[in-house]
Amino acid sequence: MARRFLFPLGVLLGVLLGFILIQPNDLTDFQTHLALLLDEFEFDVSLPRFPQLDLSSVENEWRKLRNSIPEPWKLNTNGLEFTVGETIAARGLSAKHPVVLVPGIISTGLESWSTAPEYRPFFRQKMWGGFSMLSQVTFNREKWLNGLLLDPVTGLDPPGAKVRAAEGIDAASSFIQGYWLWSKIIENMAAVNYDTNNLHLAPYDWRLSYSNLEVRDSYFSKLKATVEGFVFKWVESPQHGNGGPDWVENHIEAVIHIAGTHLAKAMAAFLSGEMKDTVQMNPAGAYVLERFFSRRERRKLFHSWSGSASMWIKGGDAVWGNTTFAPDDVDNRNQTHGELIAFRETVVKALGEHINNMTADTASNWILEHTPEHFQKMIATNYSYGIERDEESLKQNALDHTKWSNPLEVQLPNAPTTKIFCVYGHGKETERSYWYTREAYEYDEVQPDATPAICENATNCFTPRAPLDMPLSRKSMIDAEYTDNALNPKVLNGVKMGEGDGTVSLLSLGAMCVEGWKRKRWNPAGMQVTTVELPHKPVGTIPRGGGTTADHVDILGNTALNEIILKVATGAAHEVKDNFVSNIREYAKRVQWD
Ligand SMILES: *[C@@H]1O[C@H](CO)[C@@H](O)[C@H](O)[C@H]1NC(C)=O
Ligand SMILES: *[C@@H]1O[C@H](CO)[C@@H](O)[C@H](O)[C@H]1NC(C)=O
Ligand SMILES: *[C@@H]1O[C@H](CO)[C@@H](O)[C@H](O)[C@H]1NC(C)=O
Ligand SMILES: *[C@@H]1O[C@H](CO)[C@@H](O)[C@H](O)[C@H]1NC(C)=O
Ligand SMILES: *[C@@H]1O[C@H](CO)[C@@H](O)[C@H](O)[C@H]1NC(C)=O
């Protein structure tokens, strides 16, 4: 029997890709996360303040600062280094299955490879992640922005620019030196005999659509080759090169989704470019975008990164609810999450325009109508967000790449003995639905389509004949003035809070794991799916919450998560059992699966 392969995903994005993202939801968190990194460091400079500051002095300052912080408070330590690994090693367990880590979107560092004169100063410098990003954003804002934008039509590098994912384990072990991402897991794995021969990190350019990841970088082919390389001696499959129906069964021992964003969301970023409160992002990245770029610029970036469309809401009303009900509504509620986007009566009156509250389906089309035409086309040709219940159609979808990033429209592979683990946090307030408002009419230079399109669904948008006043448009945004703690669920700055890990809502994290994949329709081989919920109990005195935080990103340093990964990797997967701290099983039953 072939030696199997362990494949922990950051967070499943479609078939293979992972996301580890964060959104600094509340200021306290944001402060602890970033205070040292940027603010206390006095990086909250308005741009011209330190024109003479260069990269090396920034780095030196940062090092000095870090050296003066007592050990347990350093951002890159949590006092638990190697401890989980040592405990597991003490039991006599050791590396068994090779491991591939797939980092989350926005965690992979990106570097410039352009030799065009205007980009030469950036050559091999990090455009995303690392100190060079900070200094470039500060002193070279325009170039930085242009370098990271993709061509709106091809979704590839624009002329002159060339940005590629950084390579190796360092590409996503920390975002900026001192802000760890995968480092804790890597340390613990090293303690049970993992090293570069049996541990691989698979960084990728998360700005690209899946299809372009393969077209430009051969990402999936390389990933497959890596996996096969680990198992090479044991596999002499005639289908080698083509995969074939048994490939997963023969190559993958287990998949661990860490805080997997299965039915994701980032809708406000598409519509209004709101990042900090809506985009799941690593806090340093969100900080940079929020701080240095206007909402309009952020929206433009987001629309050019076709990879971001994988965070579009999936399953529509069947999963997310209607005007009167949502599967994850709590008892004694005053409002429903099913109204994904709602407008206050006063707002509607002030606008003098009729506008309805929207559910996932209607909101999805409305948002799409307010995106540029190139983005609509990209979505229509590369993504799909519905729910497919017919088994024949599900089988057919295996041949349609647009369906692969939506677990509701494809079946799990035919791999009866490959195990799936969903591990995620619960107990941190998470945004779930929104109150919106609209600005007065104004000219909007960014929207390339002056005439709003009409979208019947994600594959069917059309632009009616241009009316005469076409360059006028209204901008929509989160109704940030609206806060009401007396409501249930409460409203914070226009966001209706729900359950989750602080970034991703509970339904997205758990519904597929506890219900969807328990059905033959989506899991024909009956692959075993184990769900482990970890309660969010951060240690207040440690900047990133220590070993018991279950925050979307900081969970990578969580002791229980590290134990699970090591157990699965060292062949003790049978010790990992279902564990629930939320009502996900009840909520998921209320989704309209049938
Ligand atoms: C969308 O998919 C098609 C293949 O169906 C591909 O040719 C095109 O480049 C993709 N667009 C983007 C932006 O990835
Ligand atoms: C909303 O969904 C619930 C549960 O599926 C259903 O009972 C209710 O009739 C629906 N309401 C509307 C307005 O469609
Ligand atoms: C919301 O509902 C609760 C009961 O569940 C009630 O006590 C409270 O007054 C309601 N709040 C508003 C603003 O209607
Ligand atoms: C949207 O829903 C809320 C509460 O459910 C309601 O107060 C408001 O009037 C609705 N707005 C519109 C435009 O129908
Ligand atoms: C989208 O709408 C068009 C026209 O109403 C319809 O023909 C098509 O089947 C729909 N596509 C999906 C995926 O629902």
Image (tube, rainbow, N blue to C red):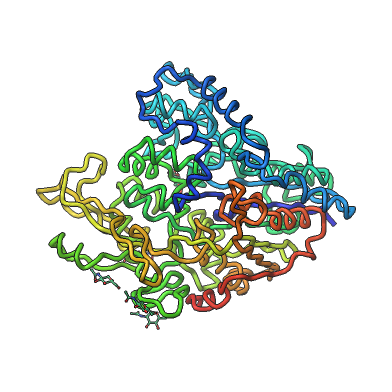
Q: Which residue is drawn at 36% across and 49% down?
A: 274
Q: Can residue 131 be seen in the rendering of this structure?
A: yes
Q: Nearer the viewer, residue 14 or 135?
A: 135
Q: Nearer the viewer, residue 331 or 340?
A: 331
* Residue sitting farthest toward the left: 468
Q: Quadrant of residue 456?
A: bottom left
Q: Which residue is drawn at 41% across and 36% down?
A: 150
Image quadrant holding the N terminus, namely bottom right
Q: How many marks?
A: 0
Q: Which of 172 and 155 is in front in this view?
A: 172
The correct choice, above or below, for 117 with respect to 111 in the image is above
Horizontal relation, residue 359 to residue 345: left or right:
right
The correct choice, above or below, for 217 with respect to 420 in the image is above
Residue 396 image offset from top left, x and y in percent? 54, 64
Q: Which of 486 and 506 is in front in this view?
A: 486
Residue 503 image offset from top left, x and y in percent? 50, 56
Ligand 2's image quarter is bottom left
Residue 206 image offset from top left, x and y in percent? 51, 42
Horizontal relation, residue 107 to residue 475: left or right:
right
The correct choice, above or below, for 417 with respect to 131 in the image is below
Residue 230 image offset from top left, x and y in percent? 77, 44
Q: Can residue 360 be seen in the rendering of this structure?
A: no
The correct choice, above or below, for 203 with respect to 390 in the image is above
